[in-house]
Image (cartoon, rainbow, N blue to C red):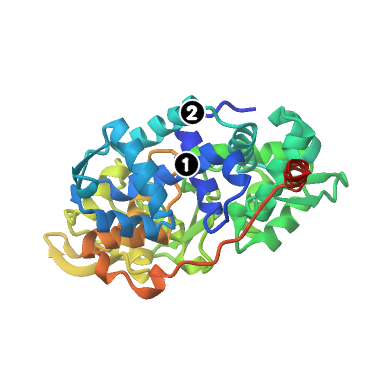
């Protein structure tokens, strides 16, 4: 099993905490207490970073937008942030008058919280869930092989799987190649599960291993142009079935260029609202300038992204080709301009919480890192910081009914214990 670094641990905790949103209290809050707490803390921390100062109501609004119970946010998350020195809480008696944030860069947040997860003593189910989700995000595993990989008892493995199945981050299928039960994570392919399953069912164990290698290659270099991707039939088939997301950009000669990515967690019901898709478009447009620009090629991708976000990019004659996808999807405007070389276009960033969130993800992708899970909820949280609590709509405020999830064997043991106490 791969040894996860601290940042990767936190990233998986964030995925688990999002999957457990709107699930009721029960043994899951014991078995996954550490992962859920660290994931919720990471989500709140990243969302209030750069806020400067905020009052308690705004902090409550951010927590609510992220679907983190405010009582827990106030009693536990805020306390953790104080202990880490990331916030200074000013109080009048027991009333919070002001929260001053001093939160470090995102990479430091992830590393520190991952260390904290280890220091706090994760349960066997915490360990299995974080490590299992990490491994399954790269490739499916035969059930017996995953059990061996995780190194836990069959009973704990069953608990790990039942939580994942009910919270929709684990699933299983029978391999058409071997007939064996195989575990995978539908979380990374929500909305495409049928086509991705058809692709995976036909794969052999050897091909699962190859998928893992290809996925790691694409994580290290997201938005890899087609001519740079390893030559393997699995790539084309994986793109066709939606296993590997890709973005196509057409140049002036009507030639299509494809940029390929590893899959990322999907939490949006409507794929059109997936902020990761926007991030992939940003990265693809920049990669296009790196590899296929007709005039001058991009040398420093992150610098270009930073210049775009700060509206300091110079007018360019190729901008209307390279960035047209971003204009279509409401991320930039392309304004006609004149330079000494002739007609050109000035790229103007459209400053919205959702666009900025997509740009943050794109920056992490260009760093060659697995991005922290962010969705429209984080954009809504940023909106609260910008516009204030009172503009938070009634629809966004609405609390969904909770869903109870439990591991059957542990639930049965709990019932036996309760019965024994009553007798």
Task: Indicate the position of residue 383 as horizontal and vertical percent values.
Answer: 28, 62
Q: Which residue is situated farthest in the bottom direction here?
A: 394
Q: Secondary structure at mark 2?
A: loop
Could you classify mark 2 by the number of other residues whose Cα lies within 10 Å: few (under 14), some (14-19), or many (20 or more)? few
The residue to which callout 2 is attached is 120
> Viewer-proximal residue, 390 or 216?
390
Q: Is residue 287 visible?
A: no
Is 175 displayed left or right of 30 in the figure? Answer: right
Marks 2 and 1, Cα distance to the nearest angstrom? 11 Å
The residue to which callout 1 is attached is 37
Q: In the rendered view, would you say 302 is above or below 331? A: above
Is 60 displayed left or right of 237 in the figure? Answer: left
What residue appears at the point 27 percent right and 63 percent down from the top-left corner? 352
Task: Indicate the position of residue 24 as horizontal and vertical percent values.
Answer: 57, 55
Q: Is residue 74 visible?
A: yes
> Viewer-proximal residue, 204 or 286?
204
Sequence-first tag of 2 and 1: 1
Task: Indicate the position of residue 167 as horizontal and vertical percent values.
Answer: 63, 54
Check if mark 2's residue and mark 1's residue have beta carbons within 8 Å: yes
* Quadrant location of the C terminus in the rendered image: top right
Task: Indicate the position of residue 344 as horizontal and vertical percent values.
Answer: 20, 64
Q: In the rendered view, would you say 86 is above or below 18? A: above
Could you classify mark 1 by the number of other residues whose Cα lies within 10 Å: few (under 14), some (14-19), or many (20 or more)? many
What residue appears at the point 18 percent right and 59 percent down from the top-left corner? 315
What residue appears at the point 39 percent right and 69 percent down from the top-left corner? 396
> Viewer-proximal residue, 388 or 221?
388
Q: In the rendered view, would you say 168 is above or below 262? A: below
* Quadrant location of the N terminus in the rendered image: top right
Q: Secondary structure at mark 1?
A: helix
């Amino acid at each position: 099993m791969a040894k996860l670094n601290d940042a990767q641990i936190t990233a998986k905790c964030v995925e688990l905490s999002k999957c457990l949103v709107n699930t009721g209290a029960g043994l899951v809050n014991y078995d996954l207490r550490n992962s859920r707490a660290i994931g919720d803390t990471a989500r709140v921390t990243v969302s209030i970073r750069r806020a400067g100062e905020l009052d308690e109501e705004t902090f409550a609004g951010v927590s609510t937008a992220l679907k983190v119970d405010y009582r827990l946010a106030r009693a536990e998350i805020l306390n953790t942030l104080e202990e880490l020195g990331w916030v200074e809480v000013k109080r009048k008696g027991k009333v919070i008058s002001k929260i001053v944030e001093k939160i470090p860069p995102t990479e430091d947040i992830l590393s520190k919280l991952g260390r904290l997860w280890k220091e706090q003593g994760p349960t066997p189910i915490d360990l299995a869930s974080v490590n299992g989700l990490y491994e399954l995000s790269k490739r499916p595993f035969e059930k017996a092989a995953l059990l061996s990989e995780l190194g836990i008892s069959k009973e704990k493995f069953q608990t790990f799987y039942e939580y994942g199945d009910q919270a929709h981050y684990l699933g299983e299928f029978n391999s058409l190649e071997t007939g064996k039960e195989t575990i995978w994570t539908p979380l990374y392919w929500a909305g495409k599960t049928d086509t991705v399953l058809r692709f995976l069912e036909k794969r052999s164990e050897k091909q699962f291993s190859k998928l893992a290698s290809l996925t790691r290659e694409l994580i290290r270099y997201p938005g890899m142009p087609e001519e740079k991707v390893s030559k393997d039939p699995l790539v084309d088939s994986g793109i066709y079935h939606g296993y590997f997301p890709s973005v196509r950009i057409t140049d002036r000669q009507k030639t299509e260029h494809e940029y390929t990515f590893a899959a990322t967690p999907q939490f949006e019901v409507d794929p059109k609202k997936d902020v990761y898709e926007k991030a992939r478009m940003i990265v693809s447009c920049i990669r296009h300038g790196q590899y296929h620009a007709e005039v001058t090629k991009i040398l420093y991708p992150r610098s270009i992204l930073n210049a775009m976000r700060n509206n300091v990019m110079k007018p360019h004659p190729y901008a209307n080709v390279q960035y047209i996808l971003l204009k279509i999807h409401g991320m930039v405007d392309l304004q006609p301009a004149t330079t000494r070389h002739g007609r050109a276009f000035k790229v103007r960033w459209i400053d919205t919480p959702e666009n900025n969130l997509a740009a943050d993800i794109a920056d992490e992708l260009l760093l060659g890192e697995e991005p922290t899970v962010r969705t429209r909820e984080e954009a809504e949280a940023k909106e609260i910081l910008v516009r204030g609590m009172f503009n938070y709509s009634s629809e966004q405020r609405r609390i969904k009914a909770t869903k109870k999830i439990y591991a059957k064997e542990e639930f049965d043991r709990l019932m036996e214990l309760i019965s024994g106490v009553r007798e």
